[in-house]
Amino acid sequence: MPELRSGARRGRASRNPTANNNQEEIDGQKVTGGRTRGRRGGGVAATRGNKGGYRGRGRRNNRQPVAAVGGGVDGEGDEKVLEEAKESSRKTTSLKASAAAEERGGVGLGLGGGGAGEEVGEKEMDEFDSGGNAVGRSGDKGLNDDDSSAPLPEKVQVGGSPVYRVDRKLGKGGFGQVYVGRRAGGNTSERNGAGAYEVALKFEHRTSKGCSYGPPYEWQVYNALGGSHGVPRVHYKGRQGDYYVMVMDMLGPSLWDVWNSNSHSMSIEMVACIAIEAISILEKMHSRGYVHGDVKPENFLLGPPGTHEEKKLFLVDLGLATKWRDNSTGLHVEYDQRPDVFRGTVRYASVHAHLGRTGSRRDDLESLAYTLIFLLRGRLPWQGYQGENKGFLVCKKKMATSPETLCCFCPLPFRHFVEYVVNLKFDEEPNYAKYVSLFDGIVGPNPDIRPINTDGAQKKKIRMGMPATQWISVYNARRPMKQRYHYNVADNRLSQHIEKGNEDGLFISSVASCSSLWALIMDAGTGFSSQVYELSPHFLHKEWIMEQWEKNYYISAIAGAQNGSSLVVMSKGTQYLQQSYKVSDAFPFKWINKKWREGFSVTSMATAGSRWAVVMSRGAGYADQVVELDFLYPSEGIHRRWDAGYRITSTAATFDQAALVLSIPRRKPTDETQETLRTSAFPSTHVKEKWAKNLYIASICYGRTWPSALMAHFEVAVAVVSVPVKLSPQIFMESAADTCALDVLQFIVGLMSMKFHMQWDGGILKSLYSL
């Protein structure tokens, strides 16, 4: 298994117990928990101090010193803390209405039960019981002017440079201010180079975020990219007074300036030339091991007007550039996701950047695609969102906007380019030459008369159709045991199923909801000794949960319904030592990250409508834990986590997001096989097939997944290996039989609109029309 680097050193447990406290501060409020109760039997690893420095990775940072909780003669203190986050009152009704109006594509109508009545399935026990990287910057990119309180010097001389007088301000970037510098003394007519009369002076104050550890990080990037095609030259750099200063070539207007001064428009040939040259610049930058991280019109500049470089394109502002390749090994950096970290500019950022995934080459190319469409059309579909939820709404809109819609008024090569780049894998090598060739037919044949110099220049699957709601089921290898499922269960039928299961020695291991009906998974391998549950109109019922905590029950499964009700199952005999939960209107990753550092692990998740509930527990038995969060089923992220030894331990989904928590157990199971399945109906047939292989349902939920229920059979994941499966007519018809006619129609429309090519056996379309 590859080493899991978290940016922090492993520490030894501290022996200083923390004080038991009935309150915990959540989002600036004090929330009262239950009384602290003693339990015999020693302490438990809890909050971990940051010994090696928390580097902003997307996994829990558990390589830090630990402190004991509780202590004394009575042993461990079991504090149960309730945490609920309410939506900010600043979110206005009009914003919500705007977001709803902007949302397109809709959600496929997946049926939850495959029939009107509830159903039950059971597997009897066969033989014996089973035995028991870089620090990100959040928000829109921008410069804090309050860190430059010291006045700028009137003259600058750094690193052996000539003396320059500081002239007019050219602007400011994300990490500094740029001024014109005029050479003081000496007659020179040079327009460019180290001896130029006019240069660009970039100032960054010593107290700015980019200078926390000395000279700006951007200097390192310019050093590494020196001489790279399309990157401006830095002639001198150094510190003068309170400022770090770079002396660079003077350049011309940005593409934003050109677009703005030309009545917010650009010719197709101009944008095609920009595409060719920008792809070439990014290819050269990527070949040096860096991704830019903030591709947008403002960061592409032309050469100085009136010079031989006036039609040359340059890419500037490298403050957000990161390495996609490890210099020492030559290998691609590790995949990770941290949803609370955003890098870039909201309008042009890739979907992966919005979701907090580690930057790679695909992100620069996706941002370039949005830049080109903006210059050509003058507007992007996700412009205009405002408020604190802007990033979320923009990301959601980007995911819902198909390449056809985005490029509906653009020549075909632009749509093809968007289709290619939005479907690149994390570590996939982009086909730069192919991307350039897309635009060759648009630009003029004579390079000398092209509006942009293109001297630098030298079928993949597509993001398909309409999103759908489906069942996501996860199966783990277990020793043979008895497991039973019920689905399409109405409220008034819950008690009889649960009581009958308890009589047979079964306890609830997982619950879910679809269309306000319930699904129960009960088995003999939970290890629980007792269980209680409550069906409540609240999501979640605080008072009842706290009452059960007092009786030493812990939450072991939760589910929420579309109407806001919830089913909470609490058990005795768990390995949990302390528990906390949070209800919020958005996925609470910041809270999860905070609790990870305190020694908690996610043990249950659920949704009700658009609301999330996450339960975290101490003593869950996990060595490490990560979250994969996406607006679609995050297949690539799951496969990469599997390769690193993680296994899915919790799932939940709303109508527009899916979240999966993956963990590394402290005790490695004998058989690590894990499979996932996505189906439009409850997977009753598939469950029985899994049981035959001693694979048992470990987690189940209903919500947003990869587009169209009929695509569920395209990919089968077994253990840590992903096996692509060709879509045969038999499999297609089996899937079609599981879904509704509307899903079939959506699938056909998706195939037609995306020009998806597939070999079909004769008569398949006739069979489809007869459904």
Image (spheres, rainbow, N blue to C red):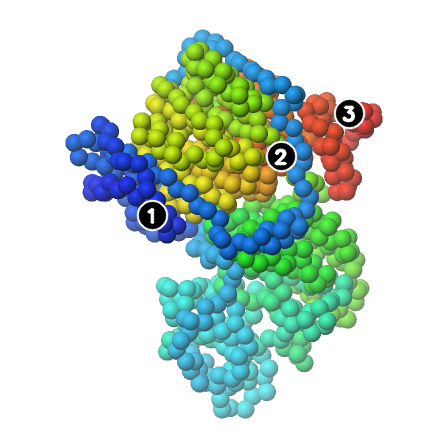
- Image vertical order of residue 423 relative to residue 520, above or below: below
Question: Could you tell me the amino acid type at mark 1?
Answer: Lys
Judging by the rendered image, the residue that carries numbered circle 2 is: 469
Of label 1 and label 3, which has the lower sequence position? 1
Residue 101 in view here: yes
Question: Could you tell me the amino acid type at mark 3?
Answer: Leu
Question: Of 179 and 604, which appears nearest the observer?
Answer: 604
Q: CA distance from mark 1 to mark 3?
A: 57 Å
The answer to which image quadrant residue 749 occupies is top right
Picture mark count: 3
**Which circle, 1 or 2, is nearer the viewer?**
1
The residue lying at 47 percent from left, 56 percent from top is 138
Quadrant containing the N terminus is top left
Question: Of 154 and 67, which appears nearest the observer?
Answer: 67
Judging by the rendered image, the residue that carries numbered circle 3 is: 771
- The crowd level at tag 3 (other Cα within 10 Å; few <14, some 14-19, many 20+) is few
Residue 30 — which label?
A: 1
Q: Is residue 79 left or right of residue 238?
A: left
Q: Position of residue 517 (x, y in %)?
A: 57, 26
Q: Is residue 429 left or right of residue 466?
A: left
Question: Of 603 and 446, which appears nearest the observer?
Answer: 603
Q: CA distance from mark 1 to mark 2?
A: 37 Å
Q: Position of residue 288 (x, y in %)?
A: 53, 57
Is there CB contact under 8 Å for labels 1 and 3?
no
- Image vertical order of residue 768 relative to residue 302, above or below: above
- The crowd level at tag 1 (other Cα within 10 Å; few <14, some 14-19, many 20+) is few
Q: Position of residue 206 (x, y in %)?
A: 38, 70
Question: Of 656 and 497, which appears nearest the observer?
Answer: 497
Check disc 2 and report its element: helix, strand or loop.
strand
Question: Could you tell me the amino acid type at mark 2?
Answer: Thr
The residue lying at 65 percent from left, 72 percent from top is 257
